[in-house]
Amino acid sequence: MHQAASLQFERVMDELVLWHAVPKDERSPAPAWWWGPAMAVVDAHEPMRQVWCCELGLGNGSSFAEGAHALLELFAEQTSQPWPDDFPRKAEIKQGEARELQPLPSDDSAFQP
């Protein structure tokens, strides 16, 4: 397995531990940035660390591919993605506070005539 893929997967597993530490009803949805590292190891059949297997609810000696599938399952029924500042816990939004998406420079509507 490529070292960069391994390092990115390790980062995701560190974040997953933080995410699981938050009570389920206060936890944000699984973040979209986990998708790429999971896809990078989806064909890797090397065994994962035991602690990662436990964190993902897999048996000892499970492969990175099995871990990737377990991560991707977190997105299966999810209908939204968290804002970056809503991870790992949902941020409380006060009444009257609204989050607005700012136009990106590549968005034609960002450049008014």
Image (spheres, rainbow, N blue to C red):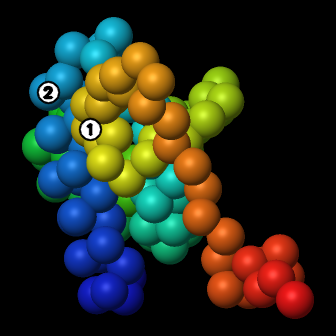
Q: Which residue in the protein does label 2 denote?
A: 21
Query: Looking at the image, do the residues carrying marks 1 and 2 touch, with CB atoms under 8 Å apart?
Result: yes
Which residue is found at the position 35% from the left and 22% from the top?
94
Residue 103 placement: quadrant: bottom right
At label 1, the amino acid type is: Pro
Q: Is residue 110 above or below residue 100?
A: below
Which residue is found at the position 41% from the left and 18% from the top?
95
Q: In x, y percent, where is residue 71?
A: 45, 44
Q: In x, y percent, where is residue 109?
A: 83, 75
Q: Could you say whether the residue bearing mark 1 is in a helix, strand or loop? A: loop
The circle on residue 1 is: none
Q: In x, y percent, where is residue 3?
A: 28, 87
* Image-based side of 11 in relation to 80, left or right: left
Q: Is residue 46 above or below residue 111?
A: above
Mark 2 neighbour density, 10 Å: few (under 14) some (14–19) many (20 or more): few
Q: Could you say whether the residue bearing mark 2 is in a helix, strand or loop? A: helix
Q: Is residue 44 above or below residue 110?
A: above
Which residue is found at the position 65% from the left and 77% from the top?
104
The circle on residue 88 is: 1
Question: In the rendered image, is residue 63 in sight?
Answer: no
Mark 1 neighbour density, 10 Å: few (under 14) some (14–19) many (20 or more): many
Q: Nearer the viewer, residue 35 or 64?
A: 35
Mark in front: 1 vs 2: 1
Q: In x, y percent, where is residue 1?
A: 37, 82
Which residue is found at the position 57% from the left and 49% from the top?
100
Question: In the rendered image, is residue 99 in sight?
Answer: yes
Distance CA(mark 1)–CA(mark 2): 9 Å
